[in-house]
C-alpha cells in the first residue's frame, strides 16, 4: 500500500451551506459533510461551547481559492 505524503488542507469549500465549516471538516477527515453536520447538531444538545468553536473555525479556516 502506498500513502500520499501530501497533507490534506483544512479549508472551507466553495460549494457550502451556511459557512462551510462542516463540509471542510468532512473533507479533511474523509467523512461525508452530512455526517459532520448531524454530529454537530447532536453535540449542540450537550452542554459546552460547540457553537463558539464553530464560529471560531468559521473565522480561522481559509476559504477555498
Image (tube, rainbow, N blue to C red):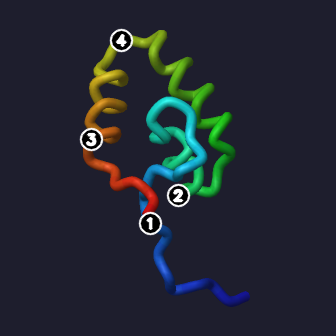
Residue located beneath label 1 in the image:
9
Q: How far apart, in angstroms, are the residues tagged by discs 1 and 2?
A: 7 Å
- In the rendered image, residue 19, in percent from the top left (x then y), is placed at 44, 35
Q: How far apart, in angstroms, are the residues tagged by discs 2 and 3?
A: 17 Å
Residue located beneath label 3 in the image:
59
Q: Earlier in the sequence, mark 3 or mark 1?
A: 1
Residue located beneath label 2 in the image:
28
Q: How far apart, in angstroms, are the residues tagged by discs 2 and 4?
A: 26 Å
Identify which residue, 26 or 46, lies in the foreground: 26
- In the rendered image, residue 39, in percent from the top left (x then y), is placed at 57, 28
Q: Secondary structure at mark 4?
A: loop
> Quadrant of residue 54 in the image?
top left
- In the rendered image, residue 11, in percent from the top left (x then y), is placed at 43, 56
Identify which residue, 53 or 61, lies in the foreground: 61
- In the rendered image, residue 37, in percent from the top left (x then y), is placed at 58, 30
Q: Residue shown at 52%/39% (left/top)?
A: 22
Q: In the rendered structure, are the residues bearing label 1 and label 2 in contact, judged by CB atoms less than 8 Å apart?
A: yes
Q: Secondary structure at mark 1?
A: loop
Amino acid at each position: 500500500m502506498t500513502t500520499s505524503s501530501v497533507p490534506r488542507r483544512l479549508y472551507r469549500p466553495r460549494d457550502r451551506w451556511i459557512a462551510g465549516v462542516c463540509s471542510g471538516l468532512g473533507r479533511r477527515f474523509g467523512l461525508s459533510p452530512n455526517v459532520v453536520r448531524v454530529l454537530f447538531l447532536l453535540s449542540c444538545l450537550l452542554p459546552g461551547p460547540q457553537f463558539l468553536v464553530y464560529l471560531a473555525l468559521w473565522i480561522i479556516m481559509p476559504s477555498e481559492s
